[in-house]
Image (cartoon, rainbow, N blue to C red):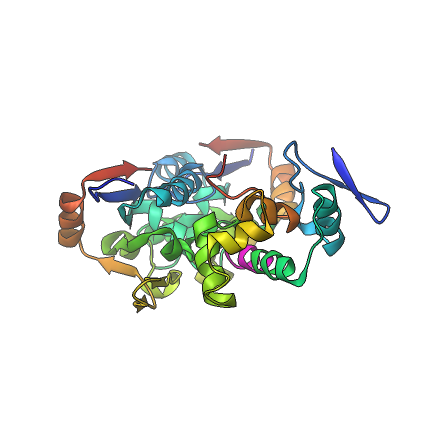
Amino acid sequence: MSILHTINKSPFERNSLDSCLRFATAGASVLLIEDGVYAVLKGASAEAQVKGALGNLNVYVLGPDLKARGFSEERVIEGVKVVDYAGFVDLAAESDKVQAWL
Amino acid sequence: MGIEVNGKVYEVDEEGYLSNIQEWEPGVAEVMAKEDNLTLTDEHWDIINFLREYYEEYQIAPAVRVLTKAVGKKLGKDKGNSKYLYGLFPYGPAKQACRYAGLPKPTGCV
Amino acid sequence: MSEVVKKFMYLNRKAPYGTIYAWESLEVVLIGAAFDQEVSLMFMDDGVFQLTKGQDTTGIGMKNFSPTYRTLGDYEVKSIYVDADSLVARGLTQDDLVQVAWEDWESGEEKENIVEVVDAARVKEIMEESDVIFSF
């Protein structure tokens, strides 16, 4: 059973990232979208948490949401994969279910 | 609603502003002016082109006093005043000229 | 036009696009410019993300309103403050932020950039000095 977790809230404003990482099981995928994309910025206070998650989770970020907010892929923590909308669809299709952390 | 320019129909909102700014062509301004019984001169075009450049840069239609000040700076003090601009666009320089330029109604206008 | 000039501060704490707050605040600032007051903007917490350079929303189908901040100097905004700690927590520096020019049309006085990164002590002072605070 694989779950795709999506997070659409900023880690600096809500605890969606915290809760998701607390309950996601090893091997699951986490996709950051909308304001959730701020979690993957290098040098930000969520960096250690995201790096820790990369140890046993697949972490993705939605490229168009990143670009909309003014950040290029160079600003993204290494190991986090940038996907486009088609990649989002693929992730959802490959997973048994999707859990949204709002 | 729509206006017809050279056989092509452009969608406009209930106040006559172009629905999609990307669709604008000079003919749109010509047809809108004609409906207002106005013939566009180079002086009108200076303002319309200015508005399009302003929108391109800042993504909003300027308020009338911002327009007035900016026109004064760009086209000369003799043009940067309400009298001159209302002379060209009697329905209000921001509202009427923005409409001809294909821009949305300026923020804050009623 | 009122005789007494009040100090208005717009406090912005939300990221753009995810919620409507940022755009609403910007619209109020643009409309409020007609009131002839002394206006400053304060960006803190996720609000600092409103000012990032290079925003490109073509991929998400929303209007990119970040270029509009650059014209605020023409809309009576005299000062734009950014909380330093909020920037640091987000891995940002002033180089990541847009520049906003300001010019007094009467006196010709010009400032190349009114965006100023300030520490917490200064943020407190600015809040104390303001007569009215609008929160977004």
Q: Against C99, is B10 above or below?
A: above
First to last magenta residue range: B52-58
Q: Nearer the viewer, residue A5 or B15?
A: B15
Q: Nearer the viewer, residue B70 or A77?
A: B70
Q: Against B16, is A58 above or below?
A: below
Q: Is residue B80 left or right of residue C96?
A: right
**Residue C119, picture quadrant:** bottom left
Where residue A83 appears, as percent x and y from the top left, is 58, 51
Q: Is any atom of residue B96 visible in this view?
A: yes
**Residue A42, picture quadrant:** bottom left
Q: Is residue C78 left or right of residue B5?
A: left
Question: Which residue: 69% across, 55% down?
Answer: B40
Q: Residue furthest right?
A: B7
Q: Against C61, is C79 above or below?
A: below
Where residue B74 appears, as percent x and y from the top left, is 50, 67
| Residue B98 is covered by the magenta coloring | no
Q: Nearer the viewer, residue C27 or A60?
A: C27
User: In the rendered view of the protein, which quadrant contains the N terminus of chain B?
Assistant: top right
**Residue C135, picture quadrant:** top left
Q: Is residue B29 left or right of residue B93?
A: right
Q: For the stretch drawn in magenta, what is the main secondary structure?
A: helix
Count the marks: 0
Where residue C19 appears, as percent x and y from the top left, is 44, 37
Q: Is any atom of residue A54 visible in this view?
A: no
Q: Is residue A27 left or right of residue C136?
A: right
Where residue A35 appears, as percent x and y from the top left, is 44, 43
Question: Which residue: 74% across, 51% down?
Answer: B30
Q: Nearer the viewer, residue A58 or A32?
A: A32
